[in-house]
Amino acid sequence: MSAQILDGNALSKTIRAEVAQRAQALTARGVKPGLVVILVGENPASQVYVRNKVKACLDCGMHSVLEQYEATLSEAALLGHIARLNADPAIHGILVQLPLPKHIDEHKVIEAIAPEKDVDGFHVSNAGLLMTGNPLFRPCTPYGVMKMLAAAQVPIKGNHAVIVGRSNIVGKPMAMLLLQESATVTICHSATRDLKAMTLQADILVAAVGRPRMITGDMVKPGAVVVDVGINRLPDGKLCGDVDFASASEVASWITPVPGGVGPMTITMLLVNTIEAAERTL
């Protein structure tokens, strides 16, 4: 068996074209969707991410601004900037790029963003709405994964989904979204005994731990759908996921590549969330 590719680049192009149409329709009604991305410090990876996010917005006909501050910015000053953006009706989405400098409390910053502008879906209010099955915003990466599964017509109802990783950004919300589609969900983590025994039960296997090529082909159930959320830079500078693509693709029915899989979908769903935020203001 050789797995079919879940192509995030191709699906992203389709969804971004739809976003551009929705942005055009909103603009015609006097509402230009607006996203502000805040970057504190000069983390090289973060700089790349935020540039890509701003460019994606502009390419779709949206208004986007990057506010970049020195790493010495105080927590109080950052909270003040967020308060200003919360009160600005021209801004529909606010995204603070993580990680933040150590002297700033990330939780306090996330909670300072107005829930209706929290297009990352990280605010405790939005996490609670997701938990109860009535989300205002779905976190971008899990949302993108669900779109990929839907596009490939992967059956979810009644199937066993195993998620390796329990972060608030991917693992937990991924579990909630799969549960809403009536999957049976298992979450694995660093304290899981016999991880391989768990992953071999998965009809849908989602790897989100940040460890290069941790999931190997012998850990994949034949015919499983494998979604690799990880993106890791190897010593030679090349990128790889949390899944050993070469061995896993010989066993799986569908698999996401790295790069070109989940990554493009994360930014795309940020655009979707921002459009949805703008549409709610009408």
Image: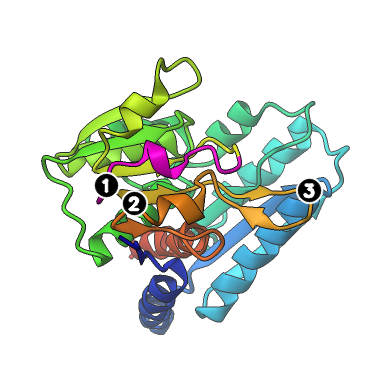
Residue 165: within the magenta?
Answer: no
2 and 1 marks in contact (CB < 8 Å): yes
Q: Position of residue 224 (x, y in %)?
A: 27, 48
At label 1, counting other C-alpha atoms closer than 10 Å, the crowd grade (few under 14, some 14-19, many 20 or more) is some
Residue 144 found in image quarter: bottom left
Quarter in which the N terminus is drawn: bottom left
User: Is 210 displayed left or right of 13 in the figure?
Assistant: right
Residue type, mark 2 in image: Val
Label 1 secondary element:
loop
Q: Which mark is residue 222?
A: 1
* Front position in the image: 222 or 50: 222
Q: Which mark is residue 251?
A: 2
For image coordinates 37% across by 78% down, the residue present is 14
Q: Position of residue 156 (x, y in %)?
A: 18, 48
Residue type, mark 1 in image: Pro
Label 3 secondary element:
loop
Q: CA distance from mark 2 to mark 1?
A: 5 Å
At label 2, counting other C-alpha atoms closer than 10 Å, the crowd grade (few under 14, some 14-19, many 20 or more) is many
Q: CA distance from mark 3 to mark 1?
A: 31 Å
Residue type, mark 3 in image: Pro
The magenta stretch is 212-223
- First reached walking from the N terminus: tag 3 or tag 2: 3
Q: Which residue is mark 3?
A: 235
For image coordinates 49% across by 42% down, the residue present is 114
Residue 220: within the magenta?
Answer: yes
Q: Which mark is residue 274?
A: none
For image coordinates 42% across by 44% down, the residue present is 217
Q: CA distance from mark 3 to mark 2?
A: 27 Å
